Image: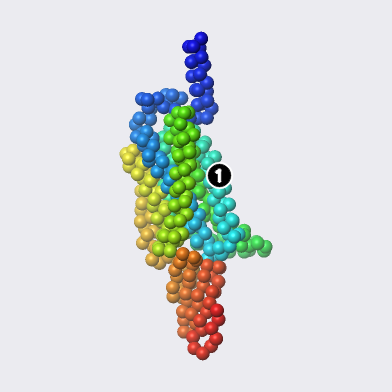
Amino acid sequence: MRIGNEYAAKTLCKAVQACYNFSVYTEDGTNETTGTSCMENKLIRSKYFLYLTEFFAGMSVMAVELGASRLMAPYFSSSQIVWTVIIGVIMIAMAIGNVWGGKLADKSATPDKLYRRLIIAAIWIALIPFVGRYLIAGISLLLALFVTKNFLVWAALAACLVIFAFPCVLLGTVTPSLTRFTVDNLDDTGKTVGRLNALNTIGSIIGTFVPTFVTIPAVGTAATFLIFSGVLAAIGIAYFVFEKKKSVPGIVSVLLIAGLCFALPSYSFAFWQSDITLEDESIYNYLQVQDDAKRTTLSTNVLFGVQSVQVKGDALTVL
């Protein structure tokens, strides 16, 4: 009778594992469900690198969100409408990534595809400040031909979808994929998933404060995108180097990010203007100064709106 109960318990356990697609391993590293061995993949066995991946993925999502607000502000303002569009688009993208990532995780025997997606996301994020400004201008001009009401809302929504949705979908696949490779057995499922969520949240907190108070005021929005894309690329490349596997996207990301770093000194939000005396970013907003023989003009991040004008000579000064 006892043997029959043990057999029934094992059968039920395997049924639950099959239903929820847990990757349960024995002491020798063999997957009880598939019969395959994961001992060759040391990163899966150690878990620390997987936890680090979750941390930096959460950090990068928030860095992209904060960077999106600063990139779009000079063109669409930093109003509540624009913030709503940015947050909404990124949350939708993350939700899609969670669902897609879960399906991909069930079919993946190793994290190779996950880290390949991270590198692709890093490449896209690196290109955002350089390509995004032209996409914003092009999308706005195109919509201006058809949209007569609530132009700001529709233009900001379209630009945000085109520029920021794709990398956030890829980053949304991280948590479900890592859950598959970090959960060893049913007994510690809750603890492992809780640890992943905690690391993601801590990374998101850091990804909120660092761009706002450190990188954007110090080196600007474009460099901030490059910094966090570099972090993601480094995580992906480290995985393939450690596993002694080749990665073409990894090589592309290194060359691209390095090349874009050289383009930073000439970066400009107002790429169509050549008479700008100073263009900079403070902890609060975008700043632009134009100086000529007649006046000095200060513009901030509200559609390049003029903040103040100092007229030279005896004429009145407009504030």
Quadrant where the C terminus sits is bottom right
Confirm whether residue 81 shows in the render: yes
Residue at left 36%, top 35%?
Answer: 46
Closest to the observer, 86 or 247 = 86
Q: Which residue appears farthest toward the top when viewing the image? A: 1
Confirm whether residue 107 shows in the render: no
Q: Percent from the top left, x then y, of residue 210?
A: 43, 56
Report how many numbered discs are placed on residues in the image. 1
Residue that carries the numbered disc 1 in the rendered image: 95
Q: Percent from the top left, x then y, of residue 34?
A: 44, 25
SS at mark 1 in the image: helix
Q: Percent from the top left, x then y, of residue 239?
A: 36, 41
Q: Percent from the top left, x then y, of residue 135?
A: 52, 59
Residue at left 45%, top 36%?
Answer: 192
Query: Can you tell which quarter of the image residue 156 is in?
Result: bottom right
Q: Which residue appears farthest toward the bottom when viewing the image? A: 314
Which amino acid is tagged 1?
A: Ala
Residue at left 54%, top 74%?
Answer: 306
Residue at left 55%, top 86%?
Answer: 316
Task: Judge whether 3 appears above or below 291 on screen.
Answer: above
Task: Judge whether 43 appears above or below 258 on screen.
Answer: above
Task: Judge whether 219 appears above or below 294 on screen.
Answer: above
